Amino acid sequence: LEKKSTLTEERVKKLEDLGMVWSILPTPANSVERKSWDERFEDLLQYKDEHGHMRVPQSYPGLGNWVHTQRVGYGLMKKGRETHLTTQKAVKLAEAGFEFVVAPRKQRTSRQNLYNPHPHLARRAAEALEGKEDPSEEGRQK
């Protein structure tokens, strides 16, 4: 329950005129503006107009986290669990073309791939340095 404040707008103005500081903590440089669900939805539609899709990276400031939260909420809804995402909001997202389930990011399968994401190219380069002919070169020479 939220208590009603006895602090009127007139009192707030008087306090501010006296130099009242309402926040003593600085706003972090990486903080994201709080927006309503409808405002974020509008941001998502704008993102779609600019990028042609709604697969917003989770690292995208503000919107990325919101999109992730919608997907998590949808997953909870499908399991019959409590969620912030209402049926109406889910329908609105779906009608706009939102993908609730996206393919997971590809995971690198070996430790080698962490250091060399293109091992086949490294192998070809090593063979070329050893004087072996690159198989892709053979096809071009014929």
Image (cartoon, rainbow, N blue to C red):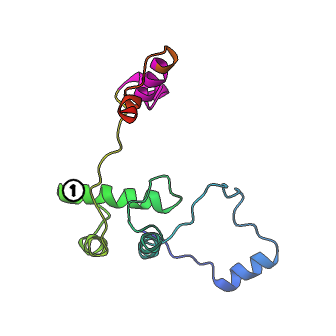
Local crowd at mark 1 within 10 Å, few (<14), some, or many (≥20)? few
Can residue 82 be seen here? The reply is no
Label 1 secondary element: loop
Q: In this view, does 103 lie to the left or right of 54?
A: left
Label the magenta part by its dominant secondary structure.
helix
Whether 125 is drawn above or below 36: the answer is above
Q: Is residue 135 magenta?
A: no
Q: Which residue is drawn at 45% across and 67% down?
A: 51
What residue occupies the far top of the structure in this picture? 130
Q: Which residue is drawn at 75% across and 66% down?
A: 21
Q: Residue 70 or 120: which is nearer the viewer?
A: 120
Q: Residue 80 or 68: which is nearer the viewer?
A: 68
Bounds of the magenta segment: 110-127
Q: Where is residue 45 in the image (x, y as percent from the top left)?
A: 42, 74
The quadrant of the image that shows the N terminus is bottom left
Asked which quadrant contains residue 42, the reply is bottom left
Q: Does the magenta stretch include residue 113?
A: yes
What residue occupies the far bottom of the structure in this picture? 10
Q: Residue 79 or 66: which is nearer the viewer?
A: 66
Q: List the residue tagged with mark 1.
A: 81
Tally the numbered discs.
1
Q: Where is residue 92 in the image (x, y as percent from the top left)?
A: 29, 75
Can residue 114 be seen here? The reply is yes
- Please state which amino acid type lies under the numbered disc 1: Arg
Q: Which residue is drawn at 17% across and 54% down?
A: 79
The quadrant of the image that shows the C terminus is top left
Q: Which residue is drawn at 77% across and 70% down?
A: 20
Whether 16 is drawn above or below 113: the answer is below
Whether 62 is drawn above or below 131: the answer is below
Q: Is residue 71 left or right of residue 112?
A: left
Q: In this view, does 26 lie to the left or right of 80?
A: right
